[in-house]
Image (spheres, rainbow, N blue to C red):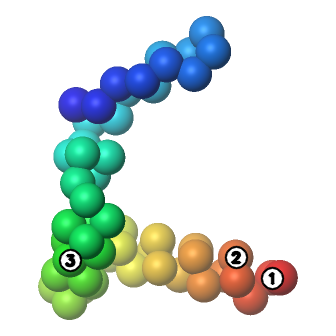
C-alpha cells in the first residue's frame, strides 16, 4: 500500500507500482502485455488515443 497526501486529500494506492523503479514497471507492463492482459491492452490503447488527438 502506498499513501500520500495532497492538500486535504489522502490518496491510498493498493499496488506496488509506485514503489517500483521505472525499469521494474516497464518490465512488468511488457510481461503483462505479452500475456495478453486485457487491462494493459486498454491502457495502451488509451495512451495511443491521447497521442493521436494532439
Q: Classify the position of the C terminus by image quarter.
A: bottom right
Q: Is residue 48 above or below residue 14?
A: below
Q: Is residue 30 above or below residue 9?
A: below
The foreground one among 35 and 10 is 10
Q: Is residue 6 visible?
A: yes
Q: Quadrant of residue 49?
A: bottom right
Mark-to-mark CA distance, 3 and 1: 27 Å
The residue drawn where x is 63% and y is 15% is: 7
Residue 46 in the image, given as x and y percentages of width and height: 58, 74
Residue at the top extreme of this rendering? 8
Which label sits on residue 39? none
Mark-to-mark CA distance, 1 and 2: 5 Å
Mark-to-mark CA distance, 3 and 2: 22 Å
Mark 1–mark 2 CB contact (< 8 Å):
yes
Among the two numbered marks 3 and 2 on one chain, the one whose residue lies closer to the N terminus? 3
Q: Secondary structure at mark 3?
A: helix
Residue annotated with mark 1:
53
Residue annotated with mark 3:
27
The residue drawn where x is 25% and y is 59% is: 21
Q: Is residue 33 above or below residue 17?
A: below
Q: Secondary structure at mark 1?
A: loop
Q: Secondary structure at mark 2?
A: helix
Q: Residues within 10 Å of mark 2 (few under 14, many from 20)?
A: few
Residue 28 in the image, given as x and y percentages of width and height: 20, 71
Among the two numbered marks 3 and 1 on one chain, the one whose residue lies closer to the N terminus? 3
Which label sits on residue 50? 2
Q: Residues within 10 Å of mark 1 (few under 14, many from 20)?
A: few
Amino acid at each position: 500500500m502506498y499513501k500520500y497526501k495532497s492538500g486535504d486529500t489522502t490518496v491510498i494506492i493498493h499496488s506496488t507500482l509506485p514503489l517500483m523503479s521505472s525499469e521494474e514497471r516497464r518490465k512488468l507492463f511488457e510481461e503483462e502485455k505479452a500475456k495478453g492482459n486485457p487491462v494493459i491492452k486498454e491502457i495502451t490503447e488509451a495512451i495511443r488515443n491521447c497521442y493521436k488527438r494532439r
